[in-house]
Each structure stands twice: as structure tokens, then as C-alpha cells.
Amino acid sequence: MSGGQAVISVRDLVVGFGDAAVLDRVSLDVFRGEILGFVGGSGAGKSVLMRAIIGLLPKRNGTIEVFGSDLASLGERERRSIERRWGVLFQQGALFSSLTALQNVAFPIREYLKLSPRLIEEIAATKLEMVGLGADVRGKFPAELSGGMIKRVALARALALDPDIVFLDEPTSGLDPIGAAEFDELIRTLQRTLGLSVFMVTHDLDSLHAVCDRIAVLSEGRVIAAGPIEAMLASEHPWLKSYFQGKRGRRVH
Amino acid sequence: MAAFPDRETLSVAALNGRVFGERVALAALGTWTAATAAELEPIIEEAARRYEHARYVDIDLARLERLDTFGAWLIERLERAFTARGSTARIIGLSDADRGLIEEVRLVNRTPQRGRAGANRILVALDDVGRAMAEMGWSLVLLAQLLGALTAAALGTIAHPSRLRLTSTIHHLERVGWRALPIILLSTFMIGAILAQQGIFRFREFGADVYVVDMVAVLVLREVGVLIVCVMVAGRSGSAYTAELGSMKMREEIDALRTMGLDPIEVLVLPRIIALVIALPLLTFLGSMAALYGAGLVCWLYGGMAPEIFLQRLREAIWLPTFEVGLIKAPFMALVIGLVACVEGFEVEGSAASLGLKTTASVVKSIFLVIALDGLFAVFFASIGM
């Protein structure tokens, strides 16, 4: 991307549990309109960083700025208005099991906007169709949906309020390769149509190749590299080399 | 902050219309987003009404400042309203940035929402009653089914005692028996005390203070002791069983057991029910003693009846069968509580709401069945003269 403004900017972030610091002075930018892929070994703290940014985990030190304002310094109201401008897709979908697909998507709209019931329903149905789910899925409960459908409904819910930033926690995990490729394509299309900035935690090398504008790599509590996929492939760093050029990495060139 | 304008501050949106003969030119102005959608919805409805006779409608988006899915959908809805009336509507002045969005919403919501058919109220009520009855019948079938499976598992375990999950049984025994003891002792102690206090208060009017001992002893030992303990156990342990089995079912743990060739009844249900069947009579005995103790204490402190007199009266008022009546019932009630709890647990479906529903049903049904069973026992004991 054209080195635009940073919508998220993390500086020297420290997050830990007990004695261990999971994130040790992490700094990272997400620029407007880009898809940032965030990779790292299992347990390296990728989800921890995401959860720290969206405020589900307390930080020990450092600053997190979203849309240019420091989250720690905001009052309840301002924080809420920022929270409205991001959507989160959790790894397991985290759909409300007692609501139908349509009600799940309608839920944030109903909570935040004073719209007529008809319009709420239409917008929620629109979002569902944008993620490729037709009228037959609207009335179904999460327990009746397949894994791929749950991810799609969860994505529709994350997009319900037309956010500026979307956080995706392993969006393609648990999907078959065809479903995963379709989901990548969907994210790409929606990102272009809606002008989203996307922060995507992933393990999926295909996703990294297919949709990510930039990749940031977390290892041993630090961001060890950030840049486009070509830079990652060219890197001589041993961890990057084994991650991107290992047996599974080479397959996707 | 200027780089990231907040949506609230820029929420100005409008739709201007001008009529040129048969042609109407509509121009959308300002911010058409989630923040302005509430004001815009009546505006587009008004526009659709006002220009309903126009033959050609142009919707000009050139002067839009911001557009999101909400705004795009409203524009699409406006266009569809004209098209539905036979007008020719088109969208002009579309910027490249907004083109994708408008094209995206053009495809959606083509299948109409399923309207809820206006059903006859009486039919709905009858339907509800019918369903409730069918469900009741079904839950009795399930109870019988589980009782059968449990009996088979129990017989299998008697034939091969090594198949009994002893560790699990002891673990559940500790949970439903030992750990329930304090709260059960406290509640029955208080029930005994309350019964005695009420009894003394009324019986004194007839000068028959001492008969309060007869009343409390018979009530507690035959009925109240076991009932209170059952209600406590159903609420405390029955609900826990349902919730445990239910969440295990939700997470496919029960299916996992089956695929390993293990019988969930034998592994999960049998130890739990054995634990209840052992624990409930013990709790009933201890609870009844606590109730009598509470009653004695109140008689002494409140009624001025010396403990010796209380004990003397107690010996005259009760005989062994009074005591047996309560204890014989306990294991059967334990079986009912355990069976209902496990049946409801296995009935849990995918959602969190269903888990809550079944846990509630487990407690309500087991308390009801315990009371019904108690009634049957009363008839039975009366006819054999106990």
C-alpha cells in the first residue's frame, strides 16, 4: 500500500501472564486499506496481540493507538465509538447460540443504531448475502450450520456496522482448501468493496500469498520482520526461512 | 483526529428532488452511512411516495461524500420501489469507489423474507398444548429407556464387578454426599426448628404442648426429611449432572466415548446414579436427625420443654416403621432424580440456551416426580399398615 496512515499503531507493547512476558516490546503498524497477515509459531502470542489491541487483555506497558487516539487515554464514550468502528471474527466464530444467523448479524445493528425493524432485517440479510449466504440460512441456529457457514455468519456479524478495521483470528482454520480459498477471495472482495483495513492472524500460507498486502512475523515475543511476501521469501532469517521455505511453504509458490 | 473523521460529527444527509415533466432527478447529498440511516429511511420512503407517478427516475450519487452498505442498501431500496411501480429508474454519477458496493447490494434480498403467517390463536394454543403433551409422553419414554439401559449396565456390572468405575463412583459420592452435607444439615435443622415453633404456638392454645413432639417426629421422619433432602439434592446435584452431561454432549465428548467402544451409560450414568442412591439415604438419615435436633432445641428454648421430656415423648411417639418409611423411599427418589438429570443431560442440543432449558427442566421434573412418587408411597404404606 502507499505507505498511508496507520489505523492501528502499537508501540513497545508488553503483555504477560504471571512472570512470563508473552509480548516483549512489540511494535507494529496496520495501514489504512491494507490486509496485514500476522504469523508466528503456535503459542507465540499472535492472538494475544489481537486481544490486547481490542481490549480483551490488559497490557503491562506501551501504547496502542487506533485511528490516531491512544486507547488507554479514552473515556467510556470515546472508546465505545471506536469499538463501533472495528469488527472481530473470533477463531470459533463465537456466534450467539440462542440467536439465528440473521439475528446474530442484526444484534450489533440493533444495539448501536436506532433503525426500524424492517431496515435492520434488510441490512442483516444484505450482510449475509455479501458473505455468500442465501435466504435459507437466515433462520438457522449456529448449531445447525457447518463450520464454513459459521465462519461466514461470524464474518457478516463482524461487518454488521460497516467497520473500518476488521480483526480476523485464523479465518481459514478448520476449512478445507477449497473453502479456505473461497474465504480468502471473499475477504479480498469485501476489503476492496468496503475499503476495509484487515488485521488477519493466520497460519495459512496460501492465505498469505493470496490476499495479504504485508506480513508481520512474531517470534520470541517480538515482531522480527514486516513486509510484503517477496521480502519474507528472500529473508535469510532462520525462522522465516524454515516457515516460508519449508516443505509446506515451497508447495504454494 | 482530522485524518479519521468520526461518523457522528459528519452525519448530514439529504435527498433533493426536481421534476422535469415525466422525468424526476433525485440527488443524494452528504453522508449516507450507518449513522444517518435512521434519518434517511423516512426520506426515501417519502420520495418513493411523492414521485410514484414519474416515468423516468435518475438517482444522482455524484455529490455523495460517504457511502457504506447501509446507504447503498437504502439507495437500492429506493430504486427498487420505483421499478416495482413500473418506472424506469437508473443510478448515475457513481464514483469508482462506490461502484463495487452498489453492484454488490443490487444482487441481494431478491428472495422475499418469509412472512409469518397470521395463525389462528386458538389453533396456536391447541398446538402448544398438543406439543407439550407429546413432549411429556416422550420424556416418560426416554426415562423408561434410560432405566432399561441402566438396569442392563448394572446387571453387566454385577456379572463383572471389575467393570464398575470405582474411582468415578467415589468421586461423585464425595460431591453429592459429603460436600452436600453442611447445607443439608443446616436446612433440615431449620425446618425442624420452624415446624416445632409453629406447632408449639398452635398446640399451646389447646394446652397440648407436648404433642408437638409427635407431630414433628412423624412429619420429619416419614415425609419432610426425605422431601427436603430430595429437593436440595435435585437442585444441587441433579442440575450439576444435567449441565455436565449436556456440555459433554455439546462438545461431542459422548460421541468420542462411543467411538472408543465404551458405553456412556456405564461410564457416565451408572457411577453418578450409584453415588446418588448411596448418598440420599445417608443424607436423609442425617438430615432427619438434624431436624429432630432443631425441633428439640426450639422446644427447650422457646417452649420451655426439658430435653428429657422431649426424648421421653419422642420414644412414645415413634416406632421403627416410622423411621423406615422415610429411609425406604430415599433410594427410589435418588433413582428418579438421577435418571431425570441424565435424560435431560443427553437431550441437550447445540446451543447455550438449550443447556439452560434442560437444566431447569431437570430440576423441575425431578422435584415434581419425587412428590408424585411420595404420594404413591403414602398410598402403599397406608395399605400395608406402616
Image (cartoon, coloured by chain):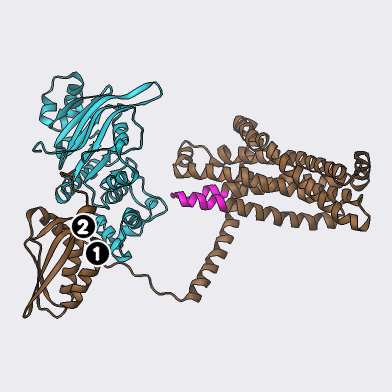
Chief SS of the magenta region: helix
Q: Whole-Å distance between the Cαs marked 2 and 1?
A: 10 Å
Q: How far across and how far down the image is residue B84, in percent? A: 18, 75
Image vertical order of residue B190 relative to residue A229, above or below: below
Looking at the rendered structure, the kind of residue marked 2 is: Ser
Q: Earlier in the sequence, mark 2 or mark 1?
A: 2
Between A70 and B331, the one lying in front of the other is A70
Magenta stretch: includes residue A227: no
Q: Which residues are magenta?
A: B343-360
In this rendering, the answer to whether B8 lies above or below B170 is below
The one of A66 and B334 positioned closer to us in this rendering = A66
Q: Residues within 10 Å of mark 2 (few under 14, many from 20)?
A: some
Task: Determine the secondary structure under disc 1.
Answer: helix
Chain ID for label 2?
A: B
Residue A68 sits in quarter: top left
In the image, the chain rendered in cyan is A
Q: Secondary structure at mark 2?
A: loop
Disc 1 target residue: B39
